[in-house]
Amino acid sequence: MFINKEKRKFLQRIKKIRNEIKLNNEKIEILESINRNHHVNLFVEKLELKNHKLEMSLLFLKTQYDVRKKLNEWD
């Protein structure tokens, strides 16, 4: 039971991060389609950096999930 709860928590966090990355990508596309100026460029760069950090978090979560899954298989 505990394992399923933990698994569900991991999967929810992964889904949340993926959705945030998707939303940020949509914002970037919109910003790039409007008049590009210095302010817009800076905002796009911030969103891209935020996405990079989110992708690293996602990778970390997936790795952590995979490791725990393997450990549980051995029990």
Image (tube, grey):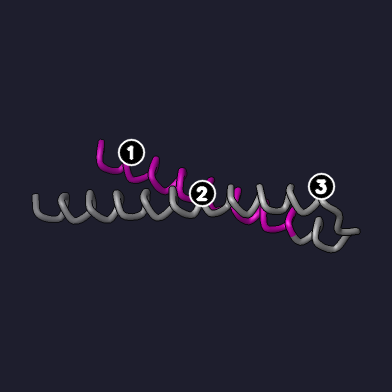
Q: CA distance from mark 1 to mark 3?
A: 44 Å
Is 36 included in the stretch rendered in magenta?
no
Crowding at label 1, few (<14), some or many (≥20) Cα neighbours within 10 Å?
A: few
| Picture residue at 25% right of the left edge, 36% below the top | 2
Q: Main secondary structure of the magenta part?
A: helix
Circle number at residue 5: 1
Disc 3 to disc 2: CB gap under 8 Å: no
| Left or right: residue 13 compared with residue 2 | right
| Measured Cα–Cα span from mark 3 to mark 2 | 23 Å
Q: Are marks 1 and 3 in contact (CB under 8 Å)?
A: no
Where are the magenta residues, as a range? 1-28
Distance from disc 2 to disc 1, alpha carbons, whole Å, reads 23 Å
Determine which of the numbered discs, if any, sits on residue 62 in the image: none
Q: Which residue is mark 3?
A: 39
- Identified by mark 3, the residue type is His
Residue at the (74%, 49%) spot, across then down: 42
Q: Secondary structure at mark 1?
A: helix
